[in-house]
Image: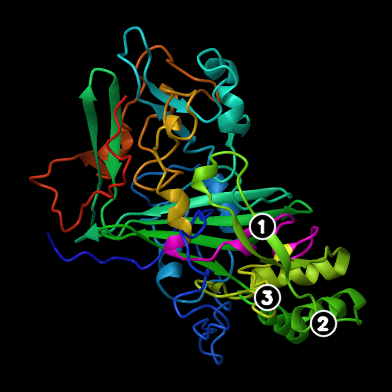
Amino acid sequence: MKRLAITSMMLLACSGAPDGGDGGGDDGGGGDPTVDAGDPAVDPCATPVVVPTTGRALDLMPAERLAELAARMPCVPPGALRDTLESPRTLWYDKHSLTPGYQDSFGDNVVTPIGMRPNTIDPELINLAVPGGHEQIFIELGLFHFPFGNPIGAQEPIHTVNFWRLPDDGGVPVPVVYWQRDPNSYTHRVEWMFPAGTAFGELIFVERGGLLHPVEIRTRTRTLDGWTVDAYRPFPRAADLADAIEQRRAGPASPALDALVAHLRDGGTPVPYTLKATHFASAFPQRASGIDRLPALAGADADVIHTLLRTTPFRSARGVYWKDAGPNKAWAAGASGPGNIVPAGYNAAAVEVSEASCDGCHRDAGRPFKTWYDNILAYGELWGNDETFTWHPFTLSRFVDGNGRVQNFNHDNREIRPDMKAAGLIVKYNPAQHSPAVYQRIVREWTDFRY
């Protein structure tokens, strides 16, 4: 196999906490000088990001929906991230075009059903088998409890769109591989593994006044033995936003923006903040930090912020503090209300952009629910696999209808998508053919569980 071009980026659906340490970045955190604004003589926003809406081997998302989101793309400087956004080999999807779901691998497929279940599963189907089980797993229909649902804590309408790109070998995609694991008569799970170089991403938009405004791009890239992560923001540090407001706003003086700039520069020391889970507690150790909640803005003041979100280059926030003055350091901005650079309720102040931080939750993709809840002895596994939550290879119509209801519940409804197979995006795993230099399982203590 030819040497693979491994793109150094993609999705950080990052909600996890570090396993330990002081939460410092790769260089100890603080005023990390590695936030590169690029060549000041070149305007990276002069040429908008152009996301192709046609010409792909497979369309997961309707072209009209992709076009709507493509029209609201943020400014991204030239480089690997922009190349991926603009590539026709990059596939785009959201929860409507790739319905999230989880596997129930316990059963014999005769008396006890097995298969794929949408996250929008009817509560009664869980509660009949495990009284109160739905309330333990889901905060509402279709949404897992934190940290596996609404990991950014947004209290405003947000829209997310995911992108996925496989590495290629001479113009041919290097595929995902899958297999079925049947260690006994009551465990039947479909597993899959991404090749090194697979890139995933998540674009987060906040909706205000009927318009979508980009606020963050989260990325994950598969390495041979794990994932690298990043998050791209227009203002990784408070001073970046202060500079942008002062340099680019026009019109009459605004007391609200003047106060915001003063808050960003010298005032507004982060206050103590604790982020913790109420469910799946062992997946998310309590995390203490500071938080800097920016004030709500409205009218022309909010318009200034929204314009900046669309016209400011998104840069890496990896290992960078939003504010590191005082005892309560914050990794990202917060917001007390709408109109600012992040959604109200945004909780990433406590979350460093790093592998240790994100692995705390992503490591559990596909883990049996019974490891968190003793009463749920055999009722499926957390959504996702190979440490990625949003993606799966199953034919939607076999397990869910257009209203989110389960299909074919009483027999195994898992079918690998024929269109993914035909496009060469997924193949059955053959260790003799699939090189360990490209494919390597990430093994956790629970990985080869059996019921």
**Which residue is label 3 attached to?**
327
Residue 281 is left or right of residue 397, and the answer is right
Q: Where 44 falls versus 356 (above or below)?
A: below
Query: Hey, what amino acid is under mark 3?
Result: Pro
Q: Quadrant of residue 333?
A: bottom right
Residue ID at (87%, 64%): 299
Query: Which of the two discs, 1 and 2, sits closer to the camera?
Result: 1
Residue ID at (46%, 58%): 19
Query: Hey, what amino acid is under mark 1?
Result: Thr
Q: Earlier in the sequence, mark 3 or mark 2?
A: 2
Q: Which mark is residue 274?
A: 1
Residue ID at (22%, 22%): 184
Q: Which mark is residue 383?
A: none
Query: Hey, what amino acid is under mark 2?
Result: Ala
Q: State the quadrant of the N terminus.
A: bottom left
Label 3 secondary element: loop
Q: Quadrant of residue 350?
A: bottom right
Disc 1 crowd rating (10 Å Cα; few below 14, some 14-19, many 20+) is few
Residue 403 visible: no
Q: Quadrant of residue 425?
A: top left
Q: Earlier in the sequence, mark 1 or mark 2?
A: 2
Residue ID at (70%, 61%): 273
Say which of 431 and 286 sits in front.
286
Residue 73 is left or right of residue 417, and the answer is right
Label 1 secondary element: strand
Q: Which residues are magenta?
A: 335-356
Say which of 443 and 312 sits in front.
443
Is residue 12 highlighted in magenta? no
Q: Which mark is residue 262?
A: 2
Disc 2 crowd rating (10 Å Cα; few below 14, some 14-19, many 20+) is few
* Overall secondary structure of the magenta section: loop
